[in-house]
Image (cartoon, coloured by chain):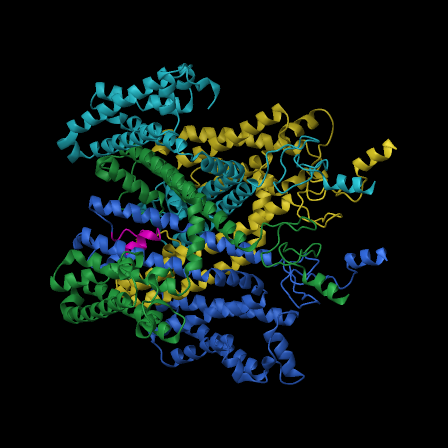
Chain colours: A green, B blue, C yellow, D cyan
Amino acid sequence: MSLAFKPAGEGLRTRIFHIIFESHTPASKGFDIALIIAILISVVVILLDSVAAYHARYGELFSLVEWCITVLFTIELALRLYCLERPWLYLKSFYGVIDLLAVLPAWLVLLVPGAHSLVLIRLLRVLRIFRILRLMEFVGEGQLLLDALRRSTRQILLFFSSILVLVTLFAALMYLIESPETGFTSIPQSIYWAIVSMTTVGYGDIVPVTPLGKAITVVLMLTGYSIIAVPTGVFSAQVIRSLREERYSDEACPGCGYDRHEKRARYCLRCGTWLDEDSEDPRKQATSDDQ
Amino acid sequence: MSLAFKPAGEGLRTRIFHIIFESHTPASKGFDIALIIAILISVVVILLDSVAAYHARYGELFSLVEWCITVLFTIELALRLYCLERPWLYLKSFYGVIDLLAVLPAWLVLLVPGAHSLVLIRLLRVLRIFRILRLMEFVGEGQLLLDALRRSTRQILLFFSSILVLVTLFAALMYLIESPETGFTSIPQSIYWAIVSMTTVGYGDIVPVTPLGKAITVVLMLTGYSIIAVPTGVFSAQVIRSLREERYSDEACPGCGYDRHEKRARYCLRCGTWLDEDSEDPRKQATSDDQ
Amino acid sequence: MSLAFKPAGEGLRTRIFHIIFESHTPASKGFDIALIIAILISVVVILLDSVAAYHARYGELFSLVEWCITVLFTIELALRLYCLERPWLYLKSFYGVIDLLAVLPAWLVLLVPGAHSLVLIRLLRVLRIFRILRLMEFVGEGQLLLDALRRSTRQILLFFSSILVLVTLFAALMYLIESPETGFTSIPQSIYWAIVSMTTVGYGDIVPVTPLGKAITVVLMLTGYSIIAVPTGVFSAQVIRSLREERYSDEACPGCGYDRHEKRARYCLRCGTWLDEDSEDPRKQATSDDQ
Amino acid sequence: MSLAFKPAGEGLRTRIFHIIFESHTPASKGFDIALIIAILISVVVILLDSVAAYHARYGELFSLVEWCITVLFTIELALRLYCLERPWLYLKSFYGVIDLLAVLPAWLVLLVPGAHSLVLIRLLRVLRIFRILRLMEFVGEGQLLLDALRRSTRQILLFFSSILVLVTLFAALMYLIESPETGFTSIPQSIYWAIVSMTTVGYGDIVPVTPLGKAITVVLMLTGYSIIAVPTGVFSAQVIRSLREERYSDEACPGCGYDRHEKRARYCLRCGTWLDEDSEDPRKQATSDDQ
């Protein structure tokens, strides 16, 4: 938590800050649970409201619930801004923008009912779930995944570029072989089919009918089936590396040079030498004290 | 096996206990095989009985077989309870509940024939297979898998939360783009489609028809195709870690009691004490030689 | 190659043995290539012969080709038996049985034309490809894979048992929820659907139509999508272990105790001590010679 | 960059060489970006031109754009050849052939309009993207992947051979069981179906209808679902090995010339010589101290 988000004063504002922004006390944990329930209810209501039958029967109830939760979220946002010293800085941060997105479009939609196409923006409040995950200390896990992803970015980019080039050439080939009647009406359409096939989704809305087309499809499917081993292998290797680096120190033992000690090791597991060169070995002190 | 499940007396009860609850003697191995055959017959009969043609022709035979096996399972459960000192404690344990579920609903169904919807509860006896697996010493393997799963729980939870958020937003987007005639009648329906697509199942009952919808589908499919590398990588790393931990010794340090040393460690990593109690510490020998 | 398969005499038989059973000389390599071409031609002919249009037009040519290759394979088998000291022992070995299967049914089919259902047995000669792979020194690779598979057998068995139990319960649930009109006519049919869905194949011949059925399908698909990480993780870990064991020795350095030397190491990479305790360090010998 | 591709003279040619063939200066980076944009525009135009509606409306615009980019690519190729000392050597290299393929067919197509089937060759210019990837220093990553692929080649070949043998036998079996009316009209058709099923694509254009056929399909699908663990495991292991080999130093032993030491090695594992030429061998110091 950077200094900019420190609570502004003592008393009420500090207490609100501890409840809303942290998650160590029972009160703040209760707040988190209430928040997650509100988010889930809100999202479920938006989803159900999109079903014509439910909208017809419960439409007004849904509006009411959404209205209530929007009011609650607005109050919550107001409290967040109230208890911070620099509220504008918060509004411009990642979570501030999400909080705003969870409130503003809802007001807009409630004022302009029937704004069908705003359903996507109203749903953006589902992103608030990440705030809860953050509070629940999932940060470390996410960090490890992001670390491994960042390390494998270039291999994965290279992998996707190769796939797209491959898919384009396969699609052009199928466009030439299969007749437009069977769905291969253009190369973009063929690319859609090639990706449906290579990712092993296989809707079956477009399928090859000529023997040659089927033979090429077989090659494409076997490629897609086995090539997934590439990003999986790269990512596995990076996760293993990240986990190992968390655990082992790079420092070598000054006694025997052994260099695969766990970070928590204080004595060499091989020759018993004191590993921390900056401080004194407690055993030596003991011996000195004896004299 | 905790004390609570110890055989109550000597003689018959002890012998029954050894046959039913253990799997070291020929008698108890024969019992296990008989049990596994009975479970499989019972399950196959329930499955076949659900086929209308077979039910019409062999319905009575199936009832008879199920009735016989239920009687056998009931006798077995009675024997289990008979040979234990604290039968109630067993009934409340995990395997006790499964044993009960394998017997009670069957009786109910036999008394109230035609209870169609009880077929699921009758099938719960398939869970008894895990008891057999446990006896066959699959415990270690399961333990290793569960260990690795428990360690990756948070990453996998984070992964699924992200997937569900992503799927919800994709679904809302497709609901706006595609017309209801093509199957995207509501957001929940769109979510069903999005998960069918992202998990690469691809039934083909709902498919995009507009060019924009197909473009978004391509992104969704490529995401689903490659994102599976994430849980696979995390789980692989954890299995490797679990396997490696077999490298850890159970012996505690005689100096400070620390008990998670690698098997190759000769000195305690916390206090530098010589770990091998059967031989002399080379350092001490060196000191002795000096004198 | 065990002693039982040693060539019987000198001269012609020994030369035939070297050509047929080994793959080091140009002659035997040429023989291998001829064999692989014959197998492929033979299989392709059987495949094409099953296409009605090709059978009508080229049926007789196909018969001729198959007849020729069968004669060649018979001669080859006769030569194999001729040049061995204990031909019966060979016939009872794995490759002997495959050789016999590649010849006998073909004779049967040629004698009894129209034996439609023998096509599968005639195709068994495709198994002869493994003999070629063996000669081409793929043995090591296959051994490594089999090693890793054997080590993960129990985890994979446990995994499949769990999947089958899960699939049975899901199938029974869907059988209760969905009406028979939509394809869920019996529990075995439901199991077929559940496996089609969980393995992410998704034919789309049977799909859920009720909202509840779709919700359960979503859970089943997400399970199938992510659970594949389990055997992949286990197998990856075992392959890594097998590769590592091939490379590193377990012996510790007598000088400093370091124990992760590559097998080819003769001196400790850490302290330069001679590692092979059974022989003399060449450097010491040099020094001794100097004196 | 080998000597053959060195710039021919000073002045203009050298400057062009630095801009076109390298990517360190702002000018050459701008050139790379312009090139990638030109490639993408060119490919997008070819794709859109294959859509009948767009071709009818914008066909002439598309021709114009493609013509312009072809002219630009031709000028670029001319400049490349101009600034090299041995242009013919470049034209025969991998990237030279791609550059030529990006230009020649386009000229052909522009001269002979309506050459529908040349669309595939015109699309080959998408391969030029790899040149850009190479400039952007993706070489290391690709090298690592290729290294790991080359090492797993034999296992992956063995894996595919086994799959194809398996698929052939499954297909023949289904051809016998299912009737031709349901799509299993020949064994090649059955093989297409078997690969669609085993790779978990599952179009649903051909599905089993008999109970026995469904049972066999279940086995095939479970095989395909789980067998993917094999190449993934092998490839993961090889990537991990490749990453680990970054641990190896390139320095050769001054004693015996051995050059595959781990970076942490201080003594040669073959002859025990002290590897660090910048410092003194501790063993020697010890001997000196003794004197």
Q: Quadrant of the C terminus of chain C?
A: top right
State the extent of the magenta-drawn residues as a range: B192-206
Furthest residue toward right: C291
Residue B2 quadrant: bottom right
Tell which of D204 and C290 is nearer to you. C290
Tell which of D164 and B171 is nearer to you. B171
Q: Position of residue A251 (x, y in %)?
A: 60, 50
Q: Is residue A159 above or below residue B164?
A: above
Q: Is residue C274 above or below residue B74?
A: above
Horizontal side of residue B84 vs B65, given as left or right: right
Horizontal side of residue B220 vs C36, given as left or right: left
Q: Is residue B117 above or below residue D4?
A: below
Number of dots carrying numbers:
0
Q: Quadrant of the N terminus of chain C?
A: top right
Q: Position of residue A20 (x, y in %)?
A: 33, 69
Determine if residue D187 is in view.
no
Q: Is residue B205 magenta?
A: yes
Q: Position of residue B52 (x, y in %)?
A: 33, 66
Determine if residue A52 is in view.
yes
- Which residue lies at the image location 54% right of the left edge and 58% below the top edge? C155
Horizontal side of residue B212 vs C26, given as left or right: left
Q: Position of residue B273 (x, y in %)?
A: 71, 62
Residue C77 quadrant: top right
